[in-house]
Image: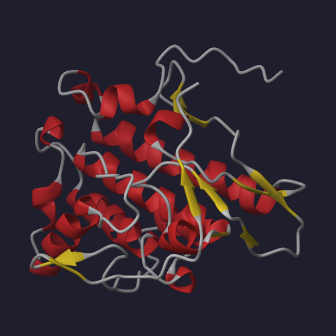
Amino acid sequence: MIVYEYVPNSSLDKFLFDAVRGKQLTWGIRYKIICGIARGLLYLHEESQLKIIHRDLKASNILLDADMNPKISDFGLAKLFDIDQTQGTTNRVMGTFGYMAPEYVMQGKFSIKSDVFSFGVLVLEILTGRKSNGSHNPEVTEVLLSYIWEKWQDGSALEIVDPALGGHYQQSDLLRCVQIGLLCVQEDPSDRPTMSTIVVMLDSETVSLRAPSQPAFYMGNGDKVATMSVNQVSMSEPELR
């Protein structure tokens, strides 16, 4: 039995994707949620006695307490790694499309960088108030990532901001979060930062960030750019508990 503390505000998705309740998520609250999730993942990856890969990080698995502090929940798909272990492989991929990293979807490979990818998608959802366009077809690209990448490239990244914020946000902090989100969803896992680096990026405005490159699952001009071969991996998406 797992006993959680009482979280009166339910889960993040109940606010984030609701036009009315989304207005309660001010920029300060959103930034606090992003930072809280980052620190939670850092604990799982580096500070716990065992390295824990969550494998199903998404808005509905982020619970909110009375003060809107985020709590990472639902460890039904989590994997325990030895301290020296860096990667695992499975022939049965389980999780939520739209949040899963390309190497996990296509090849069944998972690591701390798989969670980093999911975190990046979640950050971009928090900034935009839009759901990642998941699909049961692993070859369908991510519409949200493509949209944000093109706006970033055009220098119009502020156009992605959730209208529920009403223009009340710190531009530099928001753009920094967009950049961090894009760095997290790079196709090559080695190009994604670790959670310890991400926490430093979020906590310090003086730390310089490298420029992101085209994200995984990018679709430009109607053509799929990021492609991988499926390596006999079965796809499963668990039903809600």
Q: How is the image coloured?
A: secondary structure
Instruction: Answer left or right for 224 relative to 69.
Output: left
Q: Nearer the viewer, residue 170 or 150?
A: 150
Instruction: Answer left or right for 190 relative to 54.
Output: left
- Across and down, in percent, residue 211 comes to 34, 86
For residue 51, what is the image quadrant?
A: bottom right
Instruction: Answer left or right for 24 relative to 216.
Output: left
Q: Is residue 123 above or below residue 111?
A: above
- Across and down, in percent, residue 198 comes to 53, 67
**Quarter in which the C terminus is drawn:** top right
Q: Is residue 180 above or below residue 168?
A: below
Could you tell me which residue is drawn at 42 percent across and 71 percent down? 185
Q: Nearer the viewer, residue 16 or 68?
A: 16
Q: Nearer the viewer, residue 120 or 203?
A: 120
- Across and down, in percent, residue 134 comes to 35, 52
Q: Is residue 117 above or below residue 34?
A: below
Instruction: Answer left or right for 89 relative to 237.
Output: right
Could you tell me which residue is drawn at 69 percent across and 18 percent down? 5
Q: Nearer the viewer, residue 8 or 131?
A: 131
Could you tell me which residue is drawn at 83 percent across and 21 percent down? 1
For residue 47, what is the image quadrant?
A: bottom right
- Across and down, in percent, residue 193 comes to 55, 76
Count of picture labels: 0
